[in-house]
Image (tube, rainbow, N blue to C red):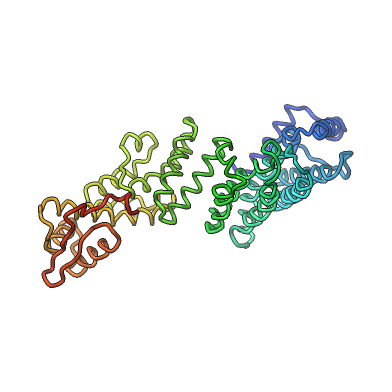
Amino acid sequence: MPYKQWYQRRVRESNLRMNINNAGGGQVKQLIAEAKSALENDDGRDFAAIMSINHQYSSSRWSINHLPIDPPFDQMLTEHFQCTNALLNGEFLTAFHHQCNIVQVFAKMFKTQKEDNWGLPMMYTIIKDMYSLALKADNVAVANGEMAGSKIDACADMLMTVFRVCASDSRTSLEFTKRWGLMTIINLLFKCYFKTNKLHLCKPLILAIESNVANRDIKDEYTISERVTFNYFVGMKYMFENEFKGAEKCLSFAFENCHKDCLNNKKKILTYLIPVKITLGFMPKAMILNKYNLVEFMDVIEAVKTGNIKLLNDTIEKNASFFIRAGIYLILEKLKVITLRNLFKKIYLISGSFQMDISRFQAALNWLGLEDVDADETECILANMINDGYIKGYLSEQHKKIVVSKVNAFPTLNTFL
């Protein structure tokens, strides 16, 4: 169901359930009373609930010019009502604009609150709502002829505003520091940057958690869900940069600590963890693949293990749409080198010699269906594998042989990748 229809149906159902007459002032008085109570008690959670686009009040139309609430909260609520009114009309660009205004007003207010972080729950709500609206607004903008990602970039800019406020609060005690909000902001920024393919902007965010002295003391104290999300994105970044050990560490943490009932999330993590594991020489068991319905990797694993380069090529081609959609097609292409390495290791073990004719390797490739591979190309493949550390040895041009080391001729993958 389209979002607009879903939202309008939700409004009708909510209005029937609440039996509210919006022409009267009862609902307005109730909302103002709740807002005042939350602010007087520095109750960020209650005020955050009111500011949510999913709150019961967001299903009603508002026409309010002035609210008897202290600034800047009156402005935030006014913008919120304009945002929800726009949502009811299906005007996602307008709704996103007002939500950005809310975040901007909040950031200015939050910055002035020294040694206090009661507004963090409010921040979590408004920035998450801003991101969800950015996705909707971006779709509308693209339909209107704008560049894809423009609203997501605008969302990231606003997120950086609150990031700076929280990151600069380094001298406040742990109990009251705003730095507790950093990981939530960073995770949303990760989502923005991955959407717009600006992964280079992730590095300063990672350093803000991993290397900043002021934040190292709390990085393991964030909620487990925040840490799972953080490690998931950091792991993906490492994978795309060919830092497979770092990727394996982060993605394994995310998978092992993701809630057992979140099967879709665990499957998403495994989609990236599996090729990383294979690259490092660890082959996932069929039981895992079946449990999370990732059977597309079955033949990939079999091909890499047995050195069957033809099976690997056929499998990648057969499941290309799945691998491209997951963003791992190029990673799987890199498995071809490991598959050839395993094939050549088999030839070495069968030969029982440290000196082998290059023609043996060419014959194996031709037998596996790569009939267009000639002696020169085979020699080139071997030379590259020696250069990259997959094989210890050298080529003898004169005798058309490969001479491999008598000690650990085929190093374990995780020792050099």
Whether residue 164 is situated above or below residue 42 in the rendered picture: below
Q: Is residue 177 left or right of residue 72?
A: left
Residue at 76% in and 45% down = 110
- Observer-nearest of 339 and 414: 414
Give x and y (percent) for residue 58: 74, 38
Q: Quadrant of residue 196?
A: bottom right
**For residue 138, above or below residue 219:** below
- Tell me: 87 left or right of 277: right
Image quarter of residue 122 = top right
Residue beneath the point at 58% across and 37% down: 222
Instruction: Estimate the x, y position of residue 242 in percent, counting from the top left.
Output: 40, 55
| Quadrant (top left/top right/bottom left/bottom right) for the N terminus | top right
Place of residue 45 in the rendered image (x, y in percent of width and height, measured from the top left): 72, 33
Q: Tell me how many marks there are.
A: 0
Comparing 132 with 21, the one in front is 132
Q: Is residue 34 left or right of residue 88?
A: right
Q: Is residue 266 visible?
A: yes
Question: Is 342 on the left or on the right of 136, as rendered?
Answer: left
Height in image: 294 above or below 34? below
Q: The C terminus lies in which quarter of the figure?
A: bottom left
Q: Is residue 53 visible?
A: no
Counting from the top left corner in percent of width and height, residue 86 is at 74, 47
Task: Identify which residue, 297 or 164, lies in the foreground.
Answer: 164
